[in-house]
Amino acid sequence: MATLSSRRRPKPRETLAAAAVLCAILTLAAWLLTTQARFSPAVTIASLAATAGSALAPAAEPAGAPASPRPPDLLAAWPAGLRPLGPAEQFSPETLSDKIDGKAELYLPAGFVGLRCQRLGLDGNLQSWFEAYVYDMGQPDQAYSVYSSQKRSVTQETAVGDFSYRAANQLCLVHGHFYLELIAADEGAAAGRATDAFAAAFVAATPVTGPTAAARDAALFPREGLVPNSVMLLSTDVFGFDRLNHVFVARYRHNGDEVTLFLSRRASAAEAAELATALRGFLVDDLGGRELPASANVPGVLIDAGGVYDGVFTSGRFLAGVHEATSAAAAERWLARLQTAVTAPPP
Amino acid sequence: MKPPPPIPPTADMNRRDFLQRSVRAGGAIALTGGLAAWLWDRRRPGQSHREPAVASVPDFSLRDGGRPLAIVMGRDRAAMLRRGLDALGGIGRFIRPGDRVLVKVNAAFATPALLGATSHPDLVAELVRQCLGAGAAGVAVTDNPINDPESCFMLTGIGPAVAAAGGRLHVPRASDFTSGSVAGGRLLRNWPILQAPLRGVTKLIGVAPVKHHARAGASMTLKNWYGLLGGRRNQFHQDINGIIEELAMLVRPTFVVLDGTSSMMANGPTGGSLADLKPTNTMILGTDGVAVDAFGATLLGRTAADLPYLARAAARGIGTVDFATLNPIRESA
Amino acid sequence: MKITTARRIAQIFFFALFVWLTVVATVGTGWSQWRGWPIAWFLQIDPLVALGTVLTTRSLHPPLGWALLTIVLTILFGRVFCGFICPFGALHQFVSWLGWRGRTARDRIAANGYRPAQAVKYYLLLVLLIAAAGNLPFALLQIGWLDPMALLHRSFNLAVLPAADLGLERLHPGGRLYQGALWVGALLAFLLLLNLILPRFFCRILCPLGALLGIIGRLAPWGIGKTAAKCTECSLCDVACEGACNPMGPIRTSECLMCMNCLDTCVPAEPLGYVPRPSAGGEITAFGVSRRGFVAALAGGLAAAPLARLGGSTKSAWPAGLVRPPGSVAEEEFLARCLKCTACIRVCPTNTLQAAGFAHGWESIWTPVLDNRIGTSGCQLNCVACGHACPTGAIRPLTLEEKFGIGDFAAQGPIRIGLAAVDRGRCLPWAMQRPCIVCEENCPVTPKAIHLSAVEEPVRDASLPLVAIDGAVVQVGGPPLPPGRLATGDYAARLPGEPLSRRIVANTSNTLTLDAEPESAGDGDLPTDGKVDILVRLQRPVVDPERCIGCGICEHECPMTGLRAIRVTADNETRSANRGVLLKASF
């Protein structure tokens, strides 16, 4: 056959036809290569089941319960490249622990209203999916409270929503009365971009009444010696005292002093004064502290709580003080600094 | 194999031929595309668009305010039937000239009439004659038995009796069943129902014996409508009271005849021994199947309370369990 | 470049692509896994698949729209699919080349002449298509026996790849087992060996797709033909003619595979060309089909479906063991769609999907059926691979929501493929007083479809004479006990006069240590005679038919390795309206 065929020289038209065949093959190959990157749903589902474990399994529904309507997606329109990997889930105060288990104890006392979650992913990149948790905390203060009280120590500030930071694989932010945690499956840049895109889209698409008024009080803390990311808004049972709520706390480390300062704006000066008395009573009567003699350069009272020192004073509507200072002298120093900061607020 | 056609091709012919071929090819491509667009499946595979049909059996009940219940004592079924019909106002009250009548018998088993598992042929034959005598244009008799239909109609004697009386036997075929639902029902949804013999029918009569039934307690006129169901109806034994209730909702007959001349007291619904039977010498006729069955229960030594489906059917407004309130006329033949 | 060179490149490309698409057909995102590869593409471009399913279902399943491309190519250029694209054709051409390499030109010219037997493929096509053309209960799709794409996929999936992977386990850790692989492989080998009798035997004589393309290809405006009468009738065009279409004489247009070899071998005046007009040597457009043969094929096709269905395999005599993968449509439509291509079987991650043998009815041969003993597990809860692999919609592509019956599918409930039933005569705790409950533990459904019924039963030779009680230690008489035998935590002892049993925590040959002192021990009036009953505490599995989805994981895990003590049948499967077990009540 070879000997027979070798004699012929192809005509130009034949070469053209052969070239057309090869071009068609190349086109097909190109299409195949692009299409193989768009994963089959079977592959996507299997990969998700592998990464997300049993989370994709059907939720146990009580027998005979009427089928609950499917909650809407977290966003009505998805940013380019982002797509939901599953239906949205919705949790009420009664069912919150089904989703986040024991951590519900942190959200429930802070006024938790509802949680919506959804798994989101990038087109064509199954490794970089993330899950968005949108907590409706009812009030901006309460959103800030759960935000601040869980803030990780190593963070990178970001500028989305009212308050936000990125820590390792998660992006956390406060937007009005919403607290969002966007937890990615890995720490890759793609996942980071995806969470940023979702956060921006969520903030843009969700109108809220504005940032918390209380958060500006956090700015009153002295700057010097402040441990980064240590400002928190505690909602209830602050320092174990059941009447003390809605208190900003901040940790300080400066020249060998280690103290916690606290600050709370009350409804009136009278309430602040009454609460200060009650707190003193709690520290002395209930915890067995010893009140130190009053001193001219110490506002309010100073209490020796068994080797650590607590102080409390009021300034107008503010209740403020130090908590667990390592020495009486340090407690005095920081009480004075805090008083200055609170009574002469910066413009 | 034809020899090659001798063609001395010219350039002109070649061009014309190529044009012809091209047009043909273009047409074929267009046709293929059109067919594909027409056949393009926009539904999912396996998806059907069947909407459940509702209320497939017409309402045959009379609401003429006439006497609803008659109880006849005796031993001769034909005489008892005639007596009972007279007590209710005569066959003319129910059957008008020109009516097309369907009689639903119980022919469930291929057993002889004397074992009492099926409607008695004497009774069925007399009923057919009565209807025809009242001027009915035609009387058909049917059932969807549990055993083989042909054998059932033959061995029970119903088939020959009907033919002798001038009626027509309707032996169900697969195509006689169409899907139907009962309005307000929860079990009879889109279920195959023996509807073909009902076509054109103006009067419907049920004829059943009094039988013990291991699952339902008793099988009488309401349970008798089970024979209008097709499909895998044995599933209904998972909720027997529910299905009898829905059968009572589905089928509203002109009147029913409950034959307690002898009653099957045990080993129902098949029986199989004369020892299972007891002469109870009673026939109940009525327009209220619930009341008829409630009385029939007493023949088995039971009360209506022993048969939950009666109260459930009554709660649906189909009849009354308390048959005494209907002032049944009592006769003997 | 010569067109035959382009053809060889195309054939190598498409054959390699075919192998690649079968190799990658395992669920995963690795470079040699499914990802987004269109693993059923060769089936989708197959016009016989499209036409066959259009006839059986009266609709064109959208993924099969690719076949239009092949049809258009064929209408324009003739059977280029056979010559350039078909991987099975390429394989036959290669084997023929190997087999006929050393033969003389005279031998090859003789072998490549037209034979009346080439009409057989038209008869086969006719039988297959007529059988498919009935209305749904009688639509019989059996093209998969001979359709080259389905046949080649099946051969690779069930025989070639698993055999090549034996011992290597590169494609599947643990390897794959396929019942009936021998016959699938033997059929392939047989068809390939036929090339030694006649080059491209399958393509010329058997291939129903080739027949279909031959019919369509008659419309092509261009074709191989003689340009002028300068032909010396040297017959050299037949030396390498793949289709046996007689290019020298009156050419059999519907037999020409567009291999273009004749252009290469035509010497010296080159009267042969690819021309936009009928061959100057004449054309024979008839298929060589005789009237008698046509009528016989027609009758065969007409009779096939009713005869096949007379067995009742889609009606009351349906095979209970024929458990179809989740998403399968109801059996009659399933059989009207399934090609026997085994794509679903190939992608099944657990190997539990098998090609049915004749045991489930000859019509179902090579269709997918679950065999829970063979695979590495049963049907996986979070897997929907088979439906997404199926090119024809015999298995629908599911979402997990639909499979679980949640969200938008809450009203339908979960998809059930069958129902597990405990064989109480074989089950260890039911029949043999041995604790087990492996099936319950492995049930993946939430809440579990298998629950447990706890009982306490006397064991064999259960009553031992009581000798003494010392605290929690009870001394017994009778034959010596195997030490430790009763200490597994599953055994309990009931002392005379005590209503409740107590767990045995240890035993020697003649003592039992209980988990607490018997109540009567403190009373001072210890029983000194009587019998101690030895009891075993058993939990017996009970299946809840409302919850069971028929996945077969319980069956796979059951320790009765031969005939399992819990087995799944297709009863209660949701795809069939008439196979339900439970009374459905709608509220």
Image (cartoon, rainbow, N blue to C red):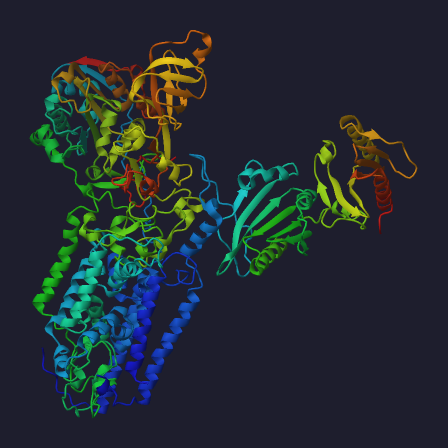
Residue furthest to the top in view is C525
Give the image location of residue C205, x and y in percent.
Answer: 16, 69
Give the image location of residue A197, x and y in percent.
Answer: 59, 58
Give the image location of residue A310, x and y in percent.
Answer: 80, 36
Give the image location of residue B152, x and y in percent.
Answer: 12, 31
Residue furthest to the right in view is A296
Residue C223 as seen in the image, left or right of residue A192? left
Is residue B122 shown above or below C37? above
Residue C165 as seen in the image, left or right of residue B104? right
The answer, for residue C133, to whether it is visible in the render is no
Residue B41 as seen in the image, left or right of residue B15? right
Q: Quadrant of the N terminus of chain C?
A: bottom left
Is residue C110 shown above or below A294? below
The answer, for residue C445, to whether it is visible in the render is yes
| Residue visible at 11% across and 24% down in the picture | B113
Q: Quick one: C562 or B158, which is closer to the camera?
A: C562
Is residue C518 shown above or below B208? above
Q: Quadrant of the C terminus of chain C?
A: top left
Q: Quick one: A240 or A218, which is closer to the camera?
A: A240
In this rendering, the count of numbered labels is 0
| Residue visible at 27% across and 80% down in the picture | B22
Q: Quick one: C71 or B52, which is closer to the camera?
A: C71
